[in-house]
Image: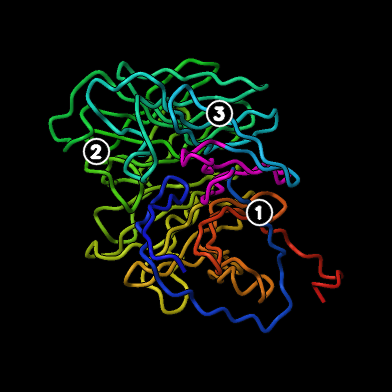
């Protein structure tokens, strides 16, 4: 394995992962999923972030010169979505039912404040310029507006084309440590028009991370911080939030006062994310609904931390479980209310170790980040359920 470190994004959630041994994989039963390696675009790194109901995956991949580009994977083909003139871009939402993809891209215009709003530079990629939320459609890229500042980022899109994300205002935030300077707020873009969403409890900044087809939006608000290597943005999250019909709801916590963030939402209004336990030293993934409130999903056996990253309309949730030293990550899928290591449900001879499960669609297909065991490279992956009566499923 290569001796290196890399900032790995977990659906706008990042961990600095140092070299580590691979977790042992136990797979005494027939595999439940087949695995597809979603490779890069001439570089060495790729990651899947989003997917539609037909298994078309969007994400990010390095090209030959080391830049990071937004990418679509479909039926074994890779499509580079390009940038706004700067070196880097990434796709984090879609494609939706009409083929739209949302994400963010750097421009060729320098940021007057020297910010790294989308975190490309901090993630080790060649970086320059401001960063804007973008919408890809019919082969063209449209930049999204801000709230008066220089930067924005799109994190999710629903089937009606409404986009959720975050955008800077023109107001400096004196509490922000460098390089971030300006306030940023949760927003949605609908037909190109931007709408600011309220934060909660006096929190100065916010980020919208997910949206469903009913227009319900999930995300977080909190305090401006240095780039948080746990979540991948310049925010120390305080409240996990749900926005609907002009109101904001605090989803509560698992006992902690901080670290609460909503990462995914389905069309039934179920929300997943992460929350600190009492004492704010440990965080666990959660699933929330109006009827049950926030429920702790726990971790895989032997682990300390977890994050739930996605949930489909059937209520199947996925995420990542992490050991006490933050060196071993294991993708999980929730089975009968309990997280199950996804690595135990794929062929035992798979060349990939599945690290995160960032998205699950209506067919139960899962995509995220994996490590190639022979090289230590990080690649996106797609796993597909195996039919019970197929040769592999027997």
Q: Residue at the spot x=32%, y=35% of the render?
A: 206
**Does label 3 or label 2 sit earlier along the sequence?**
3
Give the residues in magenta: 42-70
Question: Residue 312's spot in the image, x, y percent?
Answer: 62, 50
| Mark 3 or 1: the one toward you | 3
Instruction: Place residue 349 in its image quadrant.
Output: bottom right
As measured in the structure, the alpha-carbon distance from the residue carrying label 3 to the one carrying label 1 is 34 Å
Q: Is residue 263 left or right of residue 256?
A: right
The tag on residue 201 is 2
Q: Residue at the spot x=60%, y=36% of the render?
A: 94
Which residue appears farthest toward the bottom when viewing the image? 28
* Main secondary structure type of the part rendered in magenta: strand
| Mark 3 or 2: the one toward you | 3
Question: Residue 117's spot in the image, x, y percent?
Answer: 32, 33
Q: Toward the viewer: 74 or 96?
A: 74
The tag on residue 17 is none
As measured in the structure, the alpha-carbon distance from the residue carrying label 1 to the one carrying label 2 is 32 Å
Which residue appears farthest toward the left when viewing the image? 174
**Does label 3 or label 1 sit earlier along the sequence?**
3
Instruction: Place residue 391 in its image quadrant.
Output: bottom right
Q: Which residue is mark 1?
A: 314
Q: Secondary structure at mark 3?
A: strand
Question: Residue 136's spot in the image, x, y percent?
Answer: 59, 25
Q: Which residue is mark 3?
A: 82
Magenta stretch encompasses residue 258: no
Q: Residues within 10 Å of mark 1 (few under 14, many from 20)?
A: some
**Please, is residue 96 above or below residue 314 in the view?**
above
**Please, is residue 71 above or below residue 173 in the view?**
below
Q: Toward the viewer: 249 or 220?
A: 220
Q: Is residue 327 left or right of residue 203?
A: right
Question: Residue 91's spot in the image, x, y percent?
Answer: 53, 36
Check whether the beta carbons of the residues at disc 3 and disc 1 lie within 8 A of each other: no
């Amino acid at each position: 394995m290569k001796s290196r470190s890399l900032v790995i994004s977990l659906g706008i959630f990042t961990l600095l992962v140092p070299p580590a041994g691979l977790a042992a994989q136990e797979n005494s039963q027939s595999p439940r999923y087949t695995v597809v390696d979603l490779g890069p675009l001439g570089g060495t790194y790729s990651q899947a972030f989003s997917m539609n109901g037909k298994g078309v995956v969007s994400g990010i991949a390095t090209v030959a010169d080391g830049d990071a580009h937004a990418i679509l994977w479909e039926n074994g083909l890779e499509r580079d979505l390009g940038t706004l003139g700067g070196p880097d871009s990434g796709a984090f939402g879609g494609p939706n039912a009409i083929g739209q993809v949302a994400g963010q891209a750097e421009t060729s215009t320098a940021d007057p404040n020297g910010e790294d709003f989308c975190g490309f530079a901090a993630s080790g990629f060649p970086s320059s310029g401001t960063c804007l939320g973008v919408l890809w459609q019919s082969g063209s890229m449209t930049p999204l507006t801000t709230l008066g500042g220089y930067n924005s980022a799109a994190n999710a899109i629903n089937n009606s084309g409404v986009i959720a994300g975050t955008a800077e205002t023109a107001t400096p935030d004196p509490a922000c440590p460098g390089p971030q300077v300006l306030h940023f707020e949760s927003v949605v873009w609908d037909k190109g028009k931007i709408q600011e969403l309220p934060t909660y409890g006096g929190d100065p900044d916010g980020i919208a991370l997910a949206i469903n087809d009913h227009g319900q939006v999930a995300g977080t608000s909190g305090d401006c911080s240095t780039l948080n290597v746990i979540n991948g943005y310049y925010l120390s999250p305080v409240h996990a939030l749900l926005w609907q019909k002009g109101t904001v709801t605090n989803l509560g916590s698992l006992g902690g006062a901080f670290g609460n963030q909503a990462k995914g939402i389905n069309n039934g209004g179920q929300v997943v994310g992460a929350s600190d336990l009492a004492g704010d030293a440990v965080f666990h993934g959660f699933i929330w609904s109006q009827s049950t409130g926030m429920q702790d999903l726990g971790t895989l056996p032997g682990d300390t931390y977890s994050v739930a990253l996605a949930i489909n309309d059937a209520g199947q949730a996925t995420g990542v479980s992490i050991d006490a030293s933050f060196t071993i990550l294991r993708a999980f899928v929730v089975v009968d209310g309990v997280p199950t290591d996804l690595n135990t449900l794929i062929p035992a001879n798979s060349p990939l170790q599945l690290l995160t499960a960032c998205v699950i669609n209506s067919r139960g297909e899962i995509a995220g980040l994996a490590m190639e065991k022979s090289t230590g490279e990080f690649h996106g992956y797609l796993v597909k359920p195996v039919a019970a009566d197929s040769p592999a499923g027997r």
